[in-house]
Amino acid sequence: MKEFKNKVAVITGGANGIGLEIAKESVRRGMKVVIADCDMNAMAKAEEVLKSMNADYLALEMDVTLFEEMERLAREAVAKYGQVDLFFNNAGVAVGGPIWELPVKDIDYVIQSNLYSVCYGLKVFIPLMEAQGTPAHIVNTASVAGLVVASGMPSYFMTKHANVVLSESTHYQLQERNSNVKLSVYCPGYIQTDLHHCQFKRPERFAMDESDPYYQSETFKMGLETARFVVETGIPADSVGMMVFQAIEEERFYILTHPQYLPIAGMRVKGIMDGKNPDINLLKR
């Protein structure tokens, strides 16, 4: 897909961070934009940005962990603009901590936000875009955590690996049917976004029970501090939009931002091929 003027982009998690940068780049390329997010404070700020760009946009409050909400997003986008040309399956959260310490709500929150939502987006938007019969593209936002493994956030790494594999397998299926819909998976490293605050912007049914001892634990507090540090020292978010759109133009499947992680991904694959056990000491080196 190379022509974007007057086309329609739909972006989940579109009110801040990566999603907002993609929305801004969409507007720069003459697109109409639908941004969807559960954070209405961020949405108000995002709308001010889009208005300052004279954007033709629609802003929707939604919860990506509910299938009926994903259906509503597609329905309202089509009702407003008649079509969807780009879909950015972008919403996601980060939850740290040992799997045996995490409250069940945290496990459900990260799996449903990072994996169910991606499945729901593909299920809803692929048939819609194929029925249009025009060039279309979907970008699933995963993470470099979908290509490497470390010790700090097992539930997060699990969902991002699943996102990458889901994207790869779906990509094969779209090729088999010679679909007009192309697919990419975006695997960024640390970027200066608002991701480290997602713990406090949960849908109500995932709300933290502050009486749970976990939220008073050093594990939880250290996880928050680590998340703050790695996000705030990441690369600027304003590099995101151009990079993602270049990949769409080139029909590139893997969109990578941090090449320094590729040797670590290669080391993991080599270890599997050599039959070696995961070694924390090797990982630290």
Image (cartoon, rainbow, N blue to C red):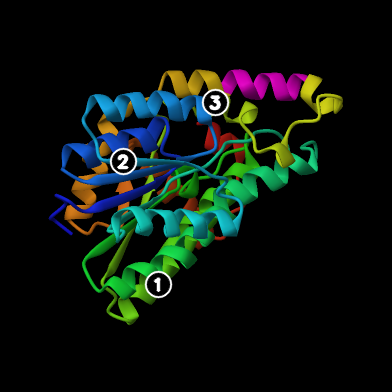
Q: Position of residue 54 (x, y in %)?
A: 21, 31
Helix, strand or loop at label 1? It is helix
Q: Quadrant of residue 151?
A: top right
For image coordinates 70% across by 33% down, the residue present is: 97
Q: Is residue 109 left or right of residue 139?
A: right
Residue nearer the viewer, 184 or 218: 184
Residue that badge 2 annotates: 57
| Label number found at residue 196 | 3
Task: For mark 2, give the secondary structure.
Answer: strand
At label 3, counting other C-alpha atoms closer than 10 Å, the crowd grade (few under 14, some 14-19, many 20 or more) is many
- 282 sits to left or right of 151: left
Label 2 amino acid? Tyr
Secondary structure at badge 3 equals: helix
The foreground one among 50 and 111 is 50
Q: Which mark is residue 127?
A: 1
Separation of disc 1 and disc 3 at Cα? 34 Å
Q: Is residue 16 magenta?
A: no
Residue 255 in percent (x, y) is at 31, 48
Question: Residue 230: percent from the left, percent from the top?
Answer: 48, 23
Residue 153 - label: none
**Contact check, label 1 and label 3, Cβ < 8 Å:** no
Q: Earlier in the sequence, mark 1 or mark 3?
A: 1
Three-letter amino acid code of the residue under disc 1: Pro
Residue 156 placement (x, y as % from top left) = 59, 43
Q: As rendered, which of 77 and 196 lies closer to the eye?
A: 77
Q: Depth-wise, is mark 2 or mark 1 nearer the camera?
A: 2
Q: In which quadrant of the rendered view does residue 189 lie?
A: top left
Residue 270 visible? The answer is no
Using the image as rendered, state which of residue 208 and residue 78 is in the foreground.
78
Magenta part of the chain: 217-226
The crowd level at tag 2 (other Cα within 10 Å; few <14, some 14-19, many 20+) is many
